[in-house]
Image (tube, helix red, strand yellow):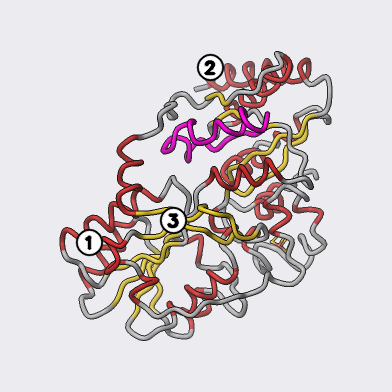
Amino acid sequence: MKQRSKESVAKAKSLLSEIQSLATTPITIMEVCGTHTVAIAKNAIRELLPTNVRLVSGPGCPVCVTANGDIDCYLYLAGQKNVITATFGDMIRVPGSEKNLQQLRAEGADIRVVYSTPDALELARQNPGKEVVFLGVGFETTVPTVAVSLDIAKREGIRNYSVLSMHKVVPPVLKLLAEDDQLVVDAFLDPGHVCSVIGIEPIKFMAEGYGKPGVVTGFEALDILEGIVMLLRQRAEGRSDIEIQYRRVVKPEGNPQAKLVIERVFKPTDALWRGIGLIPESGLAIREDYSPWDAARKFSLPVFNSRETPGCRCGDVLRGIINPTQCPLFAKHCTPMKPVGPCMVSSEGSCAAYHRYAQRS
Ligand code: SF4
């Protein structure tokens, strides 16, 4: 074990020294994924890098990018009689316009934290007199398991199970970021988990069409340092490619089976992203074949045109325009104990990561 950690330290030093020699001019790199943001903060990677290598956080926290209107919509549904809401724990404290799921539960709503979609299906089997609604929030990484749960519900005829799909896909938001004049990002650390499903073909346009190189990167400190080195090497060699650092998990073609099940159950739809707006074909709606299990059709849900929480700058944080510490509410009025926006609640949220690990701006 000691031997291994000695090797890791030596490898980290060597990568940092390569970064130092390759970073001859300033570069801004966006880490797209919230898990990267947390790993960077936890390992103080920002502090270790030369000052002309700037890392900014991106929109890769699915809880954070869920629009206020969608949050108000699922809170409305969770408050209905006879409904059991099944959700991952990350959503419990995310504030809507007036309250969150935790407060709703204290008022008597039946809200259960589940660890997987099979748990949610089991809830439906055990409560045949109730409607169990799973809150579908996540990117391509979690969508296959939700799709499989809908396949099972259809096959077994579990009619009291449904999914409220607020899922989002990553390539359209990358395109929007590449076209954003306000944002000056030179290169991207691309999301390892998402690309393990979709592969690299759907994001190649970033390098080929927009000249924004990317490296699909893993989540250990050494992975991230190596991802940065690979990006700097591309720049030094005058290349713009999408490369894979996280080769132990990500294949260029992704996971064909996972892609098939997503395609069978979901279809692209326009989706509203917090602080970013409506992005064409960036969401996933449940296909007609599965409509009896689509909570959006099963329940008559009103449309909530909710505004962003006043003062919260999650939207700018998610686009990499500001770092969390530049939000006037950060650590003053907004803390993990009393969060104003979802970026301070989610375990993958940038504001929570900066707060927890006291990051430099
Ligand atoms: Fe929103 Fe709080 Fe982050 Fe500011 S610090 S952007 S209020 S979540």
Asked whether disc 3 touches disc 1, contact meaning CB atoms under 8 Å apart, the reply is no
Q: Amino acid at mark 2?
A: Gln
Q: Is residue 289 left or right of residue 334?
A: left
Q: Amino acid at mark 1?
A: Ala
- Nearest the viewer among 50 and 175 is 175
Highlighted range, magenta: 188-211
Numbered marks: total: 3
Q: Amino acid at mark 3?
A: Leu
As for residue 258 lying within the magenta part, the answer is no
Residue 258: percent from the left, percent from the top?
34, 41
Quadrant of the displayed image that contains ligand 1: bottom right
Q: CA distance from mark 3 to mark 2?
A: 46 Å
Q: Secondary structure at mark 3?
A: strand
Residue 250: percent from the left, percent from the top?
44, 29
Q: Which residue is mark 2?
A: 3
- Nearest the viewer among 250 and 125 is 250
Q: Residue furthest left?
A: 156
